[in-house]
Amino acid sequence: MNINTKITPRLKMVADLVPECSLVADVGTDHGYLPIYLVSKGICQRAIAADVNLGPLSAARKNIAQTRVKDKIETVLSDGLKNIDHADCVTIAGMGGELIASILDFRKDSMTRFVLQPQRAMSHLRRYLAQNGFEIKKEALAKEGDKMYCAFYAEYTGVKCEISEREALAGKRELIGENPLLDEYLSYRRREIIQALESIEKAAIKGARYEELKRLLEMYV
Ligand SMILES: C[S@@+](CC[C@H](N)C(=O)[O-])C[C@H]1O[C@@H](n2cnc3c(N)ncnc32)[C@H](O)[C@@H]1O
């Protein structure tokens, strides 16, 4: 299998945030492409490819078996981090921010580095991270087809803090740095918010969510 053809821009963004390390654990691995890529490229010496469902896990096993790094990747049936004792870096990609946060609740003491790619509820995840002793060190962006994604590299420091609503919703610009996708990403998020506001307006039930979206829109001008 040529792993380069399987790594989409979203997964490449996640891989680019992973620090060089001995053992990475990819939680919710599905097809296993991310750990295969990380080990094949020498970014990680070994990997655990974990999933809570047997279907994705057996797909990952099949894919891993077709690679030259098959002996360096172990597959594990695990609900989140429950059956994983140690990893130098944990990746959790392609899930909602709430689910990622609930998985992080089972962090083991020795796990301190995390690459997280929430599909939605980014603000929930940013707030959870701050309140539970994780610090986001870097954010990245990617575009895949007509969709755009963000990912975080976070470290567990144990220092808990509160962040503003603005920071929870939009992150800190300096963590993204110079990125040619930034303006497009901000317009993309703005369009998403406008669409959500319009559908709430159509349904004529303007609750707390509507007010939150309006405040969020103001941050994306
Ligand atoms: C949308 S796929 C994402 C796959 C891959 N990480 C990616 O970003 O392309 C989500 C995967 O997470 C798995 N999953 C969902 N909840 C999980 C949990 N609590 N623990 C481990 N895996 C989980 C699902 O079985 C599925 O394979």
Image (cartoon, rainbow, N blue to C red):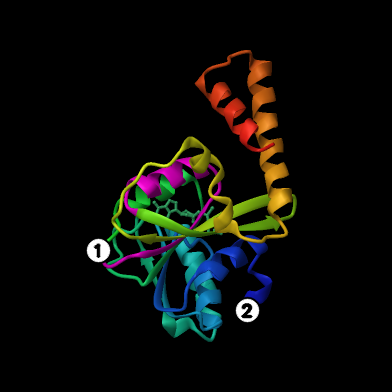
* Nearer the observer, 193 or 76: 193
User: Residue pushed farthest bottom?
Assistant: 68
Q: In this view, does 127 lie above or below 70?
A: above
User: Residue pushed farthest left?
Assistant: 109
Q: Give the amino acid type for the residue marked by disc 1 in the picture.
A: Asp
| Residue 114 falls within the magenta-colored stretch | yes
* SS state under label 1: loop
Query: From mark 1 to mark 2, how far is it between C-alphas?
Result: 36 Å
Q: Is residue 74 above or below residue 130?
A: below
Residue range (magenta):
109-133
Q: Mark 1 points at which residue?
A: 109
* Nearer the observer, 84 or 54: 84
Instruction: State which quarter of the image contains the C terminus.
Output: top right
Q: Name the residue under label 2.
A: 1
Q: Which residue is drawn at 50% across and 68% down?
A: 60
Q: Which residue is drawn at 36% across and 67% down?
A: 76
| Residue 9 falls within the magenta-colored stretch | no
Q: How crowded is mark 1: few (under 14 residues within 10 Å), some or many (20 or more)?
A: few
- Left or right: where 215 falls relative to 90: right
Residue 8 in view:
yes
Q: Position of residue 147 (x, y in %)?
A: 69, 49
* SS state under label 2: loop
